[in-house]
Amino acid sequence: MKSLRYRLAVPRPDSHLVEVDLLLPAGGPTLTVEMAAWCPGSYLIRDYARYVRDLVAEDAASGRALDIEQISKREWTIATGSADQVRIRYRVYGHELTVRTNHIDRTHAFLHGPALFLFPDAGRDWPCEVEVAAPAGWPIETALAGEGGRYRASSVDELLDSPLHLGPVELRSFHAGGRPIRLAVWGHEERGGPFGLDDLVRDLAKVIDSHAARLGDLPCERYSFILMLSPGAYGGLEHRSSSANLNSPFAFAQAKTYQELVELLSHELFHAWNGKRLHPAAFDRFDYGRENYTRCLWVIEGLTSYYDRLAVRRAGVMTAGQYLTKLLEDWGRLRAVPGRFRHSLEDASLNAWQKLYKPDESNVNTTVSYYLKGSLVMAALDLELRRRSEGEIDLDRVLVHMWREFGARGRGYPEDVRAIFEEATGLELGDFFARSIAGREDPDLVGLLAAFGLDLVSTWDGTKAEEGSRPPVWLGVVLQPGGGRTVAGVLDGGPAERAGLSPGDEIVALNRYQVAGEADLRGKLAGRSAGESIELAVFRRGRLEILPLELEHGPKSRFELTARAEASALARKLYRDWMGDDLGSGVIASAAVGGAL
Protein backbone atom coordinates (compact mmCIF):
# COMPACT_ATOMS: atom_id res chain seq x y z
CA MET A 1 0.00 0.00 0.00
CA LYS A 2 1.30 3.44 -0.89
CA SER A 3 2.12 5.68 2.07
CA LEU A 4 4.00 8.80 3.09
CA ARG A 5 6.75 8.42 5.68
CA TYR A 6 8.04 11.52 7.46
CA ARG A 7 10.84 11.96 9.95
CA LEU A 8 11.09 15.15 11.98
CA ALA A 9 14.13 16.30 13.92
CA VAL A 10 15.06 19.41 15.89
CA PRO A 11 18.81 18.98 16.43
CA ARG A 12 19.45 22.65 17.27
CA PRO A 13 16.33 24.34 18.68
CA ASP A 14 18.12 27.70 18.95
CA SER A 15 18.34 27.75 15.14
CA HIS A 16 14.50 27.78 14.97
CA LEU A 17 14.70 25.02 12.35
CA VAL A 18 12.98 21.68 12.04
CA GLU A 19 14.44 19.11 9.66
CA VAL A 20 12.02 17.05 7.59
CA ASP A 21 12.75 13.81 5.75
CA LEU A 22 9.97 12.48 3.48
CA LEU A 23 10.00 9.06 1.84
CA LEU A 24 7.34 8.44 -0.81
CA PRO A 25 6.64 6.48 -4.01
CA ALA A 26 7.92 8.05 -7.21
CA GLY A 27 4.73 7.25 -9.12
CA GLY A 28 6.19 7.95 -12.57
CA PRO A 29 8.92 9.93 -14.33
CA THR A 30 7.95 13.15 -12.53
CA LEU A 31 6.65 13.81 -9.06
CA THR A 32 5.01 17.02 -7.87
CA VAL A 33 4.87 17.96 -4.22
CA GLU A 34 3.28 20.98 -2.61
CA MET A 35 2.82 22.82 0.66
CA ALA A 36 -0.46 24.27 1.92
CA ALA A 37 -0.91 28.00 1.42
CA TRP A 38 -3.35 28.36 4.32
CA CYS A 39 -4.80 26.39 7.20
CA PRO A 40 -8.46 25.50 7.80
CA GLY A 41 -9.99 27.60 10.55
CA SER A 42 -7.84 30.63 9.70
CA TYR A 43 -8.98 32.14 6.44
CA LEU A 44 -5.92 33.89 5.02
CA ILE A 45 -3.41 32.88 2.38
CA ARG A 46 -0.21 32.66 4.44
CA ASP A 47 2.18 31.22 1.83
CA TYR A 48 3.76 28.74 4.21
CA ALA A 49 6.24 27.62 1.55
CA ARG A 50 8.25 30.78 2.23
CA TYR A 51 9.61 29.08 5.36
CA VAL A 52 11.07 26.13 3.39
CA ARG A 53 14.81 26.03 2.74
CA ASP A 54 17.52 23.59 1.58
CA LEU A 55 15.12 21.39 -0.39
CA VAL A 56 16.78 18.39 -2.09
CA ALA A 57 15.59 15.07 -3.50
CA GLU A 58 17.28 11.74 -4.20
CA ASP A 59 16.62 8.20 -5.35
CA ALA A 60 15.88 6.48 -2.03
CA ALA A 61 17.59 3.25 -3.12
CA SER A 62 20.81 4.58 -4.68
CA GLY A 63 21.13 7.99 -3.07
CA ARG A 64 21.46 9.57 -6.54
CA ALA A 65 20.51 13.26 -6.52
CA LEU A 66 17.37 14.08 -8.49
CA ASP A 67 16.67 17.32 -10.32
CA ILE A 68 14.07 19.43 -8.58
CA GLU A 69 12.39 22.55 -9.97
CA GLN A 70 10.09 24.99 -8.24
CA ILE A 71 7.10 25.61 -10.51
CA SER A 72 5.03 27.92 -8.29
CA LYS A 73 5.39 29.59 -4.93
CA ARG A 74 4.18 26.39 -3.25
CA GLU A 75 4.92 23.52 -5.70
CA TRP A 76 8.01 21.62 -6.82
CA THR A 77 8.48 19.05 -9.59
CA ILE A 78 11.07 16.25 -9.24
CA ALA A 79 12.47 14.32 -12.20
CA THR A 80 12.40 10.84 -10.68
CA GLY A 81 13.85 8.90 -13.64
CA SER A 82 13.85 5.20 -12.83
CA ALA A 83 13.52 5.64 -9.07
CA ASP A 84 10.82 3.64 -7.33
CA GLN A 85 10.97 5.70 -4.17
CA VAL A 86 12.04 9.28 -3.60
CA ARG A 87 13.54 10.80 -0.48
CA ILE A 88 12.98 14.53 -0.01
CA ARG A 89 14.87 16.49 2.60
CA TYR A 90 14.26 20.07 3.62
CA ARG A 91 14.26 22.37 6.60
CA VAL A 92 11.53 24.72 7.82
CA TYR A 93 12.14 27.92 9.76
CA GLY A 94 9.73 28.68 12.59
CA HIS A 95 9.98 31.51 15.06
CA GLU A 96 6.49 33.02 15.17
CA LEU A 97 4.50 32.13 18.27
CA THR A 98 0.94 31.80 17.00
CA VAL A 99 -1.43 28.86 16.74
CA ARG A 100 -1.08 28.82 12.93
CA THR A 101 2.71 28.91 12.51
CA ASN A 102 5.71 26.93 13.70
CA HIS A 103 7.61 28.13 16.74
CA ILE A 104 10.93 26.54 17.69
CA ASP A 105 13.32 27.69 20.38
CA ARG A 106 15.33 26.24 23.25
CA THR A 107 12.18 25.68 25.35
CA HIS A 108 9.88 23.85 22.90
CA ALA A 109 8.84 23.25 19.32
CA PHE A 110 5.25 23.85 18.25
CA LEU A 111 4.81 22.26 14.82
CA HIS A 112 1.83 23.25 12.70
CA GLY A 113 1.09 20.73 9.95
CA PRO A 114 0.15 23.03 7.04
CA ALA A 115 3.35 25.03 7.61
CA LEU A 116 5.50 21.90 7.90
CA PHE A 117 4.61 19.01 5.63
CA LEU A 118 5.18 18.72 1.88
CA PHE A 119 2.88 16.21 0.19
CA PRO A 120 1.85 15.04 -3.29
CA ASP A 121 -1.70 15.96 -4.20
CA ALA A 122 -2.11 12.48 -5.67
CA GLY A 123 -1.31 11.10 -2.22
CA ARG A 124 -3.82 13.14 -0.21
CA ASP A 125 -5.62 9.96 0.84
CA TRP A 126 -2.56 7.82 1.56
CA PRO A 127 -1.80 6.82 5.14
CA CYS A 128 1.07 8.73 6.76
CA GLU A 129 3.70 7.72 9.27
CA VAL A 130 5.59 10.27 11.33
CA GLU A 131 8.74 9.57 13.32
CA VAL A 132 9.75 12.38 15.65
CA ALA A 133 13.30 12.69 16.95
CA ALA A 134 12.76 15.20 19.76
CA PRO A 135 15.63 16.65 21.79
CA ALA A 136 16.55 14.56 24.81
CA GLY A 137 14.00 14.85 27.59
CA TRP A 138 11.37 16.54 25.45
CA PRO A 139 7.96 14.80 25.60
CA ILE A 140 5.66 14.92 22.58
CA GLU A 141 2.01 15.94 22.67
CA THR A 142 -0.25 15.31 19.67
CA ALA A 143 -3.65 13.88 18.83
CA LEU A 144 -2.08 11.53 16.25
CA ALA A 145 -2.37 7.84 17.05
CA GLY A 146 0.84 6.25 18.30
CA GLU A 147 3.43 6.80 21.01
CA GLY A 148 7.13 6.88 21.66
CA GLY A 149 7.88 9.21 18.81
CA ARG A 150 6.10 7.12 16.17
CA TYR A 151 2.71 8.28 14.97
CA ARG A 152 0.30 7.66 12.14
CA ALA A 153 -2.45 9.48 10.29
CA SER A 154 -5.06 8.03 7.96
CA SER A 155 -4.46 10.74 5.34
CA VAL A 156 -2.68 13.98 4.62
CA ASP A 157 -5.78 15.85 5.77
CA GLU A 158 -5.57 14.24 9.20
CA LEU A 159 -1.83 14.85 9.31
CA LEU A 160 -2.21 18.56 8.57
CA ASP A 161 -4.98 18.76 11.16
CA SER A 162 -2.89 17.36 14.02
CA PRO A 163 -0.29 19.76 15.47
CA LEU A 164 2.63 18.45 17.49
CA HIS A 165 4.17 20.02 20.58
CA LEU A 166 7.67 18.98 21.59
CA GLY A 167 9.09 20.09 24.91
CA PRO A 168 8.47 20.17 28.65
CA VAL A 169 4.83 20.70 29.61
CA GLU A 170 2.68 20.38 32.67
CA LEU A 171 0.40 17.52 31.66
CA ARG A 172 -3.01 16.74 33.10
CA SER A 173 -5.12 13.78 32.02
CA PHE A 174 -8.80 13.45 32.83
CA HIS A 175 -12.05 12.06 31.45
CA ALA A 176 -14.93 14.17 30.12
CA GLY A 177 -17.42 14.10 27.28
CA GLY A 178 -17.13 10.32 27.24
CA ARG A 179 -13.48 10.45 26.16
CA PRO A 180 -9.97 10.69 27.62
CA ILE A 181 -8.74 14.30 27.61
CA ARG A 182 -5.19 15.63 27.86
CA LEU A 183 -4.22 19.18 28.77
CA ALA A 184 -0.57 19.99 27.99
CA VAL A 185 0.53 23.42 29.25
CA TRP A 186 3.78 25.01 28.05
CA GLY A 187 5.00 28.11 29.86
CA HIS A 188 4.42 28.97 33.47
CA GLU A 189 1.24 30.44 34.85
CA GLU A 190 1.83 33.10 37.47
CA ARG A 191 1.29 31.48 40.84
CA GLY A 192 -0.42 33.10 43.80
CA GLY A 193 -3.72 33.96 42.09
CA PRO A 194 -7.07 32.46 43.02
CA PHE A 195 -7.00 29.94 40.15
CA GLY A 196 -4.62 27.21 38.99
CA LEU A 197 -4.40 24.18 36.73
CA ASP A 198 -6.41 22.04 39.12
CA ASP A 199 -9.27 24.54 38.83
CA LEU A 200 -8.90 24.59 35.05
CA VAL A 201 -9.08 20.80 34.79
CA ARG A 202 -12.14 20.68 37.06
CA ASP A 203 -13.98 23.45 35.21
CA LEU A 204 -12.96 22.30 31.75
CA ALA A 205 -14.35 18.84 32.48
CA LYS A 206 -17.68 20.42 33.43
CA VAL A 207 -17.75 22.49 30.25
CA ILE A 208 -16.94 19.49 28.05
CA ASP A 209 -19.70 17.50 29.73
CA SER A 210 -22.08 20.40 29.14
CA HIS A 211 -21.37 20.31 25.40
CA ALA A 212 -21.66 16.52 25.32
CA ALA A 213 -25.00 16.65 27.12
CA ARG A 214 -26.47 18.16 23.94
CA LEU A 215 -24.50 16.42 21.21
CA GLY A 216 -23.34 13.13 22.70
CA ASP A 217 -19.81 11.93 23.38
CA LEU A 218 -16.93 13.76 21.76
CA PRO A 219 -16.70 12.56 18.14
CA CYS A 220 -13.07 11.43 18.45
CA GLU A 221 -11.27 8.68 20.35
CA ARG A 222 -9.32 11.17 22.48
CA TYR A 223 -8.86 14.91 22.67
CA SER A 224 -5.78 17.00 23.37
CA PHE A 225 -5.59 20.65 24.43
CA ILE A 226 -2.22 22.26 23.71
CA LEU A 227 -2.10 25.43 25.81
CA MET A 228 0.88 27.76 25.40
CA LEU A 229 1.28 30.60 27.90
CA SER A 230 3.12 33.76 26.88
CA PRO A 231 2.66 37.41 27.92
CA GLY A 232 0.32 39.27 25.59
CA ALA A 233 -0.58 36.13 23.66
CA TYR A 234 -4.13 35.10 22.82
CA GLY A 235 -5.77 32.85 20.27
CA GLY A 236 -6.95 29.40 19.43
CA LEU A 237 -7.19 27.12 16.42
CA GLU A 238 -9.44 24.12 16.23
CA HIS A 239 -8.38 20.71 14.96
CA ARG A 240 -10.27 17.49 14.48
CA SER A 241 -9.13 15.87 17.73
CA SER A 242 -7.19 18.65 19.40
CA SER A 243 -6.75 22.39 19.62
CA ALA A 244 -3.81 24.77 19.84
CA ASN A 245 -4.34 27.63 22.27
CA LEU A 246 -2.42 30.72 23.35
CA ASN A 247 -3.07 32.73 26.47
CA SER A 248 -1.41 34.89 29.07
CA PRO A 249 0.43 33.40 32.06
CA PHE A 250 -1.53 35.95 34.11
CA ALA A 251 -4.90 34.47 33.05
CA PHE A 252 -5.19 32.67 36.39
CA ALA A 253 -4.87 35.87 38.43
CA GLN A 254 -8.50 37.01 38.39
CA ALA A 255 -11.97 35.65 37.67
CA LYS A 256 -12.51 37.65 34.44
CA THR A 257 -9.31 36.51 32.72
CA TYR A 258 -9.68 32.98 34.01
CA GLN A 259 -13.21 32.73 32.63
CA GLU A 260 -11.97 34.08 29.30
CA LEU A 261 -9.40 31.27 29.22
CA VAL A 262 -12.08 28.65 29.94
CA GLU A 263 -14.27 30.25 27.28
CA LEU A 264 -11.45 30.05 24.72
CA LEU A 265 -10.90 26.35 25.41
CA SER A 266 -14.66 25.77 25.32
CA HIS A 267 -14.80 27.47 21.90
CA GLU A 268 -12.05 25.37 20.33
CA LEU A 269 -13.40 22.15 21.87
CA PHE A 270 -16.90 22.82 20.51
CA HIS A 271 -15.39 22.99 17.02
CA ALA A 272 -14.77 19.23 17.25
CA TRP A 273 -18.49 19.03 16.51
CA ASN A 274 -19.28 22.34 14.80
CA GLY A 275 -16.73 23.26 12.16
CA LYS A 276 -14.68 20.10 11.89
CA ARG A 277 -17.44 17.56 11.31
CA LEU A 278 -20.49 19.79 10.96
CA HIS A 279 -19.53 22.12 8.13
CA PRO A 280 -20.76 23.57 4.83
CA ALA A 281 -20.39 21.41 1.74
CA ALA A 282 -17.79 23.89 0.46
CA PHE A 283 -15.47 22.47 3.13
CA ASP A 284 -16.01 18.78 2.32
CA ARG A 285 -12.54 18.65 0.76
CA PHE A 286 -10.23 21.61 1.12
CA ASP A 287 -8.14 23.06 -1.65
CA TYR A 288 -4.96 23.96 0.23
CA GLY A 289 -3.67 26.13 -2.59
CA ARG A 290 -6.35 28.82 -2.78
CA GLU A 291 -9.20 30.49 -0.92
CA ASN A 292 -12.15 28.22 -0.09
CA TYR A 293 -15.28 30.38 0.00
CA THR A 294 -18.49 29.98 1.98
CA ARG A 295 -21.20 32.31 3.26
CA CYS A 296 -21.59 30.16 6.37
CA LEU A 297 -18.66 31.11 8.59
CA TRP A 298 -21.27 32.72 10.83
CA VAL A 299 -22.59 29.19 11.47
CA ILE A 300 -19.13 27.80 12.18
CA GLU A 301 -17.95 30.69 14.34
CA GLY A 302 -21.05 32.63 15.42
CA LEU A 303 -22.89 29.54 16.63
CA THR A 304 -19.72 28.34 18.35
CA SER A 305 -19.15 31.74 19.97
CA TYR A 306 -22.67 31.60 21.42
CA TYR A 307 -22.33 28.09 22.76
CA ASP A 308 -18.77 28.42 24.07
CA ARG A 309 -19.90 30.92 26.75
CA LEU A 310 -23.31 29.33 27.28
CA ALA A 311 -21.59 26.04 28.14
CA VAL A 312 -19.37 27.86 30.65
CA ARG A 313 -22.51 29.30 32.24
CA ARG A 314 -24.35 25.96 32.20
CA ALA A 315 -21.33 24.33 33.80
CA GLY A 316 -21.51 26.81 36.66
CA VAL A 317 -18.10 28.32 35.92
CA MET A 318 -19.67 31.77 35.62
CA THR A 319 -22.79 33.20 37.20
CA ALA A 320 -25.83 34.37 35.28
CA GLY A 321 -24.86 37.95 36.11
CA GLN A 322 -21.35 37.45 34.72
CA TYR A 323 -22.75 35.84 31.57
CA LEU A 324 -25.21 38.69 30.99
CA THR A 325 -22.51 41.29 31.63
CA LYS A 326 -20.44 39.74 28.84
CA LEU A 327 -23.54 39.73 26.62
CA LEU A 328 -23.90 43.47 27.23
CA GLU A 329 -20.22 44.05 26.46
CA ASP A 330 -20.66 42.27 23.13
CA TRP A 331 -23.79 44.30 22.42
CA GLY A 332 -21.91 47.53 23.03
CA ARG A 333 -18.99 46.41 20.86
CA LEU A 334 -21.33 45.56 18.00
CA ARG A 335 -23.12 48.90 18.15
CA ALA A 336 -19.77 50.70 17.91
CA VAL A 337 -19.06 49.16 14.47
CA PRO A 338 -20.43 51.23 11.54
CA GLY A 339 -19.45 48.42 9.16
CA ARG A 340 -22.41 46.35 10.36
CA PHE A 341 -24.59 48.52 8.14
CA ARG A 342 -22.51 47.60 5.06
CA HIS A 343 -21.89 43.88 5.54
CA SER A 344 -24.36 41.15 6.44
CA LEU A 345 -23.20 38.03 8.27
CA GLU A 346 -23.20 36.21 4.94
CA ASP A 347 -21.16 38.97 3.30
CA ALA A 348 -18.68 39.02 6.19
CA SER A 349 -18.28 35.24 5.88
CA LEU A 350 -17.59 35.36 2.16
CA ASN A 351 -15.12 38.24 2.55
CA ALA A 352 -13.21 36.90 5.56
CA TRP A 353 -10.14 36.29 3.39
CA GLN A 354 -9.75 39.99 2.61
CA LYS A 355 -11.54 41.66 5.52
CA LEU A 356 -11.43 39.86 8.88
CA TYR A 357 -7.98 38.36 8.31
CA LYS A 358 -6.56 41.34 6.40
CA PRO A 359 -7.82 44.28 8.45
CA ASP A 360 -6.95 47.82 7.49
CA GLU A 361 -7.78 51.22 8.89
CA SER A 362 -11.19 51.25 7.19
CA ASN A 363 -12.40 47.84 8.38
CA VAL A 364 -14.50 49.24 11.21
CA ASN A 365 -16.52 51.10 8.56
CA THR A 366 -16.81 48.35 5.97
CA THR A 367 -17.41 45.01 7.66
CA VAL A 368 -18.51 43.29 10.85
CA SER A 369 -17.10 40.27 12.68
CA TYR A 370 -19.11 37.10 12.12
CA TYR A 371 -17.80 36.00 15.52
CA LEU A 372 -19.20 39.03 17.35
CA LYS A 373 -22.41 39.65 15.43
CA GLY A 374 -22.83 35.93 14.77
CA SER A 375 -22.87 35.11 18.49
CA LEU A 376 -25.38 37.90 19.22
CA VAL A 377 -27.63 36.85 16.35
CA MET A 378 -27.53 33.25 17.59
CA ALA A 379 -28.38 34.43 21.10
CA ALA A 380 -31.28 36.42 19.63
CA LEU A 381 -32.45 33.41 17.63
CA ASP A 382 -32.34 31.23 20.76
CA LEU A 383 -34.47 33.80 22.60
CA GLU A 384 -36.81 34.12 19.60
CA LEU A 385 -37.39 30.37 19.43
CA ARG A 386 -38.01 30.13 23.16
CA ARG A 387 -40.37 33.13 23.11
CA ARG A 388 -42.42 31.96 20.13
CA SER A 389 -42.78 28.41 21.49
CA GLU A 390 -43.25 29.48 25.13
CA GLY A 391 -40.14 27.56 26.03
CA GLU A 392 -40.81 24.37 24.07
CA ILE A 393 -38.22 24.99 21.32
CA ASP A 394 -34.72 26.41 21.57
CA LEU A 395 -31.52 26.65 19.55
CA ASP A 396 -30.34 23.32 20.98
CA ARG A 397 -32.94 21.66 18.78
CA VAL A 398 -31.38 23.21 15.66
CA LEU A 399 -27.89 22.22 16.73
CA VAL A 400 -28.83 18.61 17.46
CA HIS A 401 -30.78 18.34 14.21
CA MET A 402 -27.88 19.66 12.14
CA TRP A 403 -25.46 17.35 13.91
CA ARG A 404 -27.58 14.25 13.30
CA GLU A 405 -28.40 15.09 9.68
CA PHE A 406 -25.00 16.35 8.57
CA GLY A 407 -22.13 16.21 11.07
CA ALA A 408 -22.69 12.65 12.29
CA ARG A 409 -23.24 11.49 8.70
CA GLY A 410 -20.09 13.08 7.34
CA ARG A 411 -21.80 15.29 4.77
CA GLY A 412 -21.69 19.05 4.39
CA TYR A 413 -24.77 21.20 4.61
CA PRO A 414 -25.86 23.58 1.79
CA GLU A 415 -25.02 27.27 1.78
CA ASP A 416 -28.64 28.27 2.41
CA VAL A 417 -29.31 26.85 5.88
CA ARG A 418 -32.60 28.59 6.59
CA ALA A 419 -34.64 25.56 5.52
CA ILE A 420 -32.58 23.37 7.87
CA PHE A 421 -33.29 25.69 10.80
CA GLU A 422 -37.00 25.71 9.91
CA GLU A 423 -37.12 21.94 9.57
CA ALA A 424 -35.54 21.55 12.99
CA THR A 425 -37.90 23.95 14.74
CA GLY A 426 -41.11 23.73 12.73
CA LEU A 427 -41.17 27.54 12.69
CA GLU A 428 -41.01 29.98 9.79
CA LEU A 429 -37.79 31.98 10.12
CA GLY A 430 -37.62 33.80 6.81
CA ASP A 431 -38.05 37.27 8.32
CA PHE A 432 -35.37 36.68 10.95
CA PHE A 433 -32.86 35.44 8.37
CA ALA A 434 -33.69 38.25 5.95
CA ARG A 435 -33.10 40.92 8.59
CA SER A 436 -30.20 39.66 10.69
CA ILE A 437 -28.28 37.10 8.58
CA ALA A 438 -28.76 37.91 4.91
CA GLY A 439 -29.60 41.50 5.86
CA ARG A 440 -27.77 44.14 7.85
CA GLU A 441 -30.06 44.83 10.77
CA ASP A 442 -29.11 44.45 14.40
CA PRO A 443 -30.92 41.65 16.21
CA ASP A 444 -33.84 42.90 18.32
CA LEU A 445 -32.13 42.11 21.59
CA VAL A 446 -34.08 44.75 23.51
CA GLY A 447 -37.47 43.34 22.50
CA LEU A 448 -36.45 39.74 22.97
CA LEU A 449 -34.97 40.24 26.43
CA ALA A 450 -38.19 41.97 27.47
CA ALA A 451 -40.02 38.67 26.93
CA PHE A 452 -37.63 37.15 29.48
CA GLY A 453 -38.41 39.77 32.13
CA LEU A 454 -35.38 41.94 31.38
CA ASP A 455 -35.20 45.61 30.49
CA LEU A 456 -32.13 46.57 28.45
CA VAL A 457 -31.39 50.28 28.88
CA SER A 458 -28.66 52.20 27.06
CA THR A 459 -27.17 55.38 28.52
CA TRP A 460 -24.02 57.46 28.28
CA ASP A 461 -21.28 56.26 30.58
CA GLY A 462 -20.69 58.56 33.54
CA THR A 463 -23.99 60.42 33.28
CA LYS A 464 -26.82 60.53 35.79
CA ALA A 465 -29.95 62.10 34.41
CA GLU A 466 -31.31 62.97 37.86
CA GLU A 467 -28.24 65.15 38.46
CA GLY A 468 -28.71 66.97 35.18
CA SER A 469 -25.30 65.98 33.81
CA ARG A 470 -24.74 66.33 30.09
CA PRO A 471 -24.02 63.40 27.74
CA PRO A 472 -20.35 63.34 26.76
CA VAL A 473 -19.18 64.48 23.36
CA TRP A 474 -16.88 62.63 21.02
CA LEU A 475 -14.71 63.05 17.93
CA GLY A 476 -15.45 59.68 16.33
CA VAL A 477 -11.85 58.45 16.16
CA VAL A 478 -9.95 55.43 17.40
CA LEU A 479 -6.43 56.19 18.60
CA GLN A 480 -3.52 53.81 18.28
CA PRO A 481 -3.00 51.62 21.35
CA GLY A 482 -0.67 52.79 24.05
CA GLY A 483 -2.27 56.05 25.14
CA GLY A 484 -0.74 58.19 22.40
CA ARG A 485 -2.42 60.73 20.16
CA THR A 486 -2.11 59.22 16.66
CA VAL A 487 -5.37 58.39 14.88
CA ALA A 488 -5.75 54.71 13.96
CA GLY A 489 -9.25 54.92 12.50
CA VAL A 490 -11.98 57.43 11.71
CA LEU A 491 -15.59 56.31 12.09
CA ASP A 492 -18.05 57.03 9.31
CA GLY A 493 -20.62 59.67 10.14
CA GLY A 494 -18.73 61.14 13.09
CA PRO A 495 -17.46 64.69 13.65
CA ALA A 496 -13.86 63.74 12.80
CA GLU A 497 -14.84 62.35 9.41
CA ARG A 498 -16.75 65.51 8.52
CA ALA A 499 -13.82 67.63 9.68
CA GLY A 500 -11.42 65.70 7.45
CA LEU A 501 -9.34 63.84 10.04
CA SER A 502 -7.48 60.85 8.60
CA PRO A 503 -5.79 57.76 10.01
CA GLY A 504 -2.17 58.62 10.71
CA ASP A 505 -2.90 62.18 11.83
CA GLU A 506 -1.25 63.09 15.13
CA ILE A 507 -3.50 65.29 17.26
CA VAL A 508 -1.17 67.79 18.94
CA ALA A 509 -3.47 70.58 20.15
CA LEU A 510 -7.11 71.42 20.91
CA ASN A 511 -8.01 75.10 20.73
CA ARG A 512 -4.27 75.82 20.63
CA TYR A 513 -3.61 73.96 23.91
CA GLN A 514 -1.15 71.07 23.64
CA VAL A 515 -2.52 67.53 23.74
CA ALA A 516 -0.10 65.28 25.61
CA GLY A 517 -1.84 61.98 24.91
CA GLU A 518 -5.17 60.16 24.87
CA ALA A 519 -5.98 60.77 28.54
CA ASP A 520 -5.20 64.46 28.15
CA LEU A 521 -7.39 64.70 25.05
CA ARG A 522 -10.29 63.05 26.87
CA GLY A 523 -9.84 65.50 29.69
CA LYS A 524 -9.90 68.50 27.36
CA LEU A 525 -13.14 67.20 25.78
CA ALA A 526 -14.83 66.56 29.14
CA GLY A 527 -17.53 69.06 30.00
CA ARG A 528 -17.92 70.35 26.46
CA SER A 529 -21.31 70.37 24.75
CA ALA A 530 -22.74 69.02 21.54
CA GLY A 531 -22.79 71.73 18.87
CA GLU A 532 -19.70 73.45 20.27
CA SER A 533 -17.00 74.24 17.73
CA ILE A 534 -13.38 73.47 18.44
CA GLU A 535 -10.13 73.61 16.54
CA LEU A 536 -7.81 70.62 16.27
CA ALA A 537 -4.18 70.94 15.30
CA VAL A 538 -2.70 67.81 13.74
CA PHE A 539 0.55 66.79 12.15
CA ARG A 540 -0.11 65.06 8.82
CA ARG A 541 2.96 63.66 7.09
CA GLY A 542 5.04 66.13 9.11
CA ARG A 543 3.02 69.22 8.16
CA LEU A 544 0.82 71.09 10.62
CA GLU A 545 -2.87 71.21 9.68
CA ILE A 546 -5.64 73.13 11.50
CA LEU A 547 -9.08 71.49 11.33
CA PRO A 548 -12.28 73.10 12.65
CA LEU A 549 -14.71 70.56 14.11
CA GLU A 550 -18.21 70.66 15.56
CA LEU A 551 -18.71 68.30 18.52
CA GLU A 552 -21.58 65.84 18.86
CA HIS A 553 -22.92 63.57 21.56
CA GLY A 554 -21.06 60.29 21.54
CA PRO A 555 -22.98 57.02 21.15
CA LYS A 556 -24.48 55.52 24.27
CA SER A 557 -21.87 53.29 25.78
CA ARG A 558 -23.32 52.05 29.05
CA PHE A 559 -25.81 49.19 29.13
CA GLU A 560 -27.86 47.83 32.02
CA LEU A 561 -30.14 44.85 32.39
CA THR A 562 -32.84 45.20 35.01
CA ALA A 563 -35.16 42.43 36.11
CA ARG A 564 -38.79 43.53 35.94
CA ALA A 565 -40.50 43.26 39.31
CA GLU A 566 -43.82 42.64 37.52
CA ALA A 567 -42.41 40.00 35.13
CA SER A 568 -44.97 37.34 34.25
CA ALA A 569 -44.73 33.71 35.28
CA LEU A 570 -43.96 32.80 31.65
CA ALA A 571 -41.14 35.37 31.45
CA ARG A 572 -39.65 34.00 34.68
CA LYS A 573 -39.87 30.46 33.34
CA LEU A 574 -38.22 31.45 30.04
CA TYR A 575 -35.40 33.16 31.92
CA ARG A 576 -34.91 30.19 34.27
CA ASP A 577 -34.79 27.72 31.38
CA TRP A 578 -32.26 29.89 29.53
CA MET A 579 -30.00 30.97 32.37
CA GLY A 580 -30.55 28.12 34.81
CA ASP A 581 -31.32 30.58 37.61
CA ASP A 582 -34.22 32.60 39.01
CA LEU A 583 -34.78 36.05 37.57
CA GLY A 584 -34.02 38.00 40.72
CA SER A 585 -34.66 41.74 41.01
CA GLY A 586 -33.09 45.10 40.27
CA VAL A 587 -30.03 45.64 38.09
CA ILE A 588 -28.54 42.21 37.40
CA ALA A 589 -25.89 43.16 34.83
CA SER A 590 -24.19 46.30 33.57
CA ALA A 591 -21.31 47.11 31.25
CA ALA A 592 -19.55 50.21 29.98
CA VAL A 593 -17.95 49.77 26.58
CA GLY A 594 -15.15 52.15 25.67
CA GLY A 595 -13.15 52.39 22.48
CA ALA A 596 -13.75 55.33 20.19
CA LEU A 597 -12.97 58.84 21.44
Image (tube, rainbow, N blue to C red):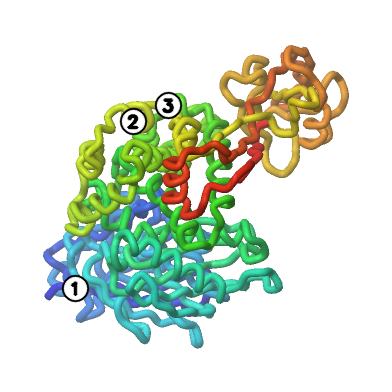
Callout 3 environment at 10 Å: few (<14), some (14 to 19), or many (20+)? some
- Front-most of residues 3 and 415: 415
Please indicate, yes or no, whether residue 228 appears anywhere in the rendered image: yes
Q: Secondary structure at mark 1?
A: loop
Seen at 58% across and 58% down, the residue is 233
Q: Secondary structure at mark 2?
A: helix
Residue 588, by quadrant, is: top right
Task: Name the amino acid type tagged 2.
Answer: Phe
- Pick out the residue farthest to the right: 513
| Callout 3 touching callout 1 (CB < 8 Å) | no
Give percent across and percent down for residue 234: 55, 56
Callout 2 environment at 10 Å: few (<14), some (14 to 19), or many (20+)? some
| Callout 3 touching callout 2 (CB < 8 Å) | no
Callout 1 environment at 10 Å: few (<14), some (14 to 19), or many (20+)? some
Give percent across and percent down for residue 39: 36, 54
Q: Work out how far the residue at label 3 is from the one at label 1, CA to CA, in angstroms.
A: 51 Å
Which one is earlier in the sequence, the residue at label 3 or at label 1? 1
* Residue with the mark numbered 3: 441
Q: Does 212 sit above or below residue 485?
A: below
Seen at 68% across and 73% down, the residue is 191
* Residue with the mark numbered 1: 3
Q: Work out how far the residue at label 3 is from the one at label 2, CA to CA, in angstroms.
A: 10 Å
Task: Name the amino acid type tagged 1.
Answer: Ser
Q: Does 594 sit above or below residue 172?
A: above
Task: Name the amino acid type tagged 3.
Answer: Glu
* Residue with the mark numbered 2: 432
Please indicate, yes or no, whether residue 589 appears anywhere in the rendered image: no
Seen at 25% across and 68% down, the residue is 66
